[in-house]
Image (spheres, grey):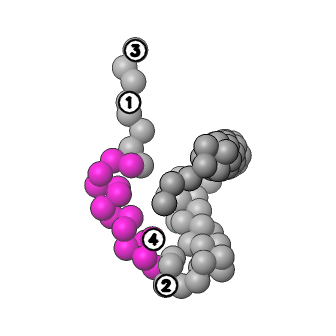
């Protein structure tokens, strides 16, 4: 089954809008994280609270099985480097 060019264009626009929204969300979270660290909160404590909050939200939105499936794939994704930010030497 082929798609019409207009459909592809709309899909691309929706994908780009979703990507833009994820980047904006990450910017908000980075800012909040940096403020919390500046205020003296331990980063390990922040990480655990952030994970708890994110997983709780995923369970509420998608259900326990879907959230558990996502969590099961996390180790593989971490090992694959999806969460590693390259270090830039200057």
- Mark found first going from the N terminus, 1 or 4: 4
Say whether marks 4 and 2 touch (CB < 8 Å).
no
**Could you say whether the residue bearing mark 4 is in a helix, strand or loop?**
helix
Please tell me which residue lies in front, 44 or 57: 57
Quarter placement of the C terminus: top left
* For residue 64, side relative to residue 22 (left or right): left
Residue 79: image quadrant is: bottom left
Count neighbours of disc 3 (C-alpha within 10 A) and say few if under 14, some if 14 to 19, many if 20 or more.
Answer: few
- Label ID, residue 87: 1
- Mark found first going from the N terminus, 3 or 2: 2
Name the mark nearer the viewer: 4 or 3: 4
Count neighbours of disc 4 (C-alpha within 10 A) and say few if under 14, some if 14 to 19, many if 20 or more.
Answer: few
Is 45 contained in the magenta span? no
Q: Which SS does the magenta portion mostly show?
A: helix
Residue at 33% x, 47% y is: 81
Q: Which residue of the protein is positioned furthest toward the top in this rendering?
A: 90
Say whether marks 1 and 3 touch (CB < 8 Å).
no
Say whether marks 3 and 2 touch (CB < 8 Å).
no
Q: Which residue is mark 2?
A: 65
Q: Which residues are magenta?
A: 68-82
Q: Which residue is mark 3?
A: 90
Name the mark nearer the viewer: 2 or 1: 2
- Label ID, residue 70: 4
Q: Find the distance from the CA under tag 3 to the CA under tag 2.
A: 45 Å
- Mark found first going from the N terminus, 2 or 1: 2
Name the mark nearer the viewer: 1 or 4: 4
Q: Find the distance from the CA under tag 4 to the CA under tag 2.
A: 9 Å
**Could you say whether the residue bearing mark 3 is in a helix, strand or loop?**
loop
* For residue 47, side relative to residue 73 (left or right): right
Q: Which residue of the protein is positioned furthest toward the bottom in this rendering?
A: 64
């Amino acid at each position: 089954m082929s798609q019409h060019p207009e459909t592809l264009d709309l899909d691309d626009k929706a994908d780009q809008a979703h990507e833009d929204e994820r980047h904006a969300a990450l910017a908000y979270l980075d800012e909040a994280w940096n403020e919390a660290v500046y205020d003296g909160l331990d980063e390990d404590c922040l990480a655990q609270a952030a994970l708890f909050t994110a997983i709780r939200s995923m369970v509420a939105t998608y259900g326990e099985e879907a959230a558990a499936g996502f969590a099961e794939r996390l180790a593989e994704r971490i090992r694959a480097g999806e969460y590693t930010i390259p270090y830039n030497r200057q």
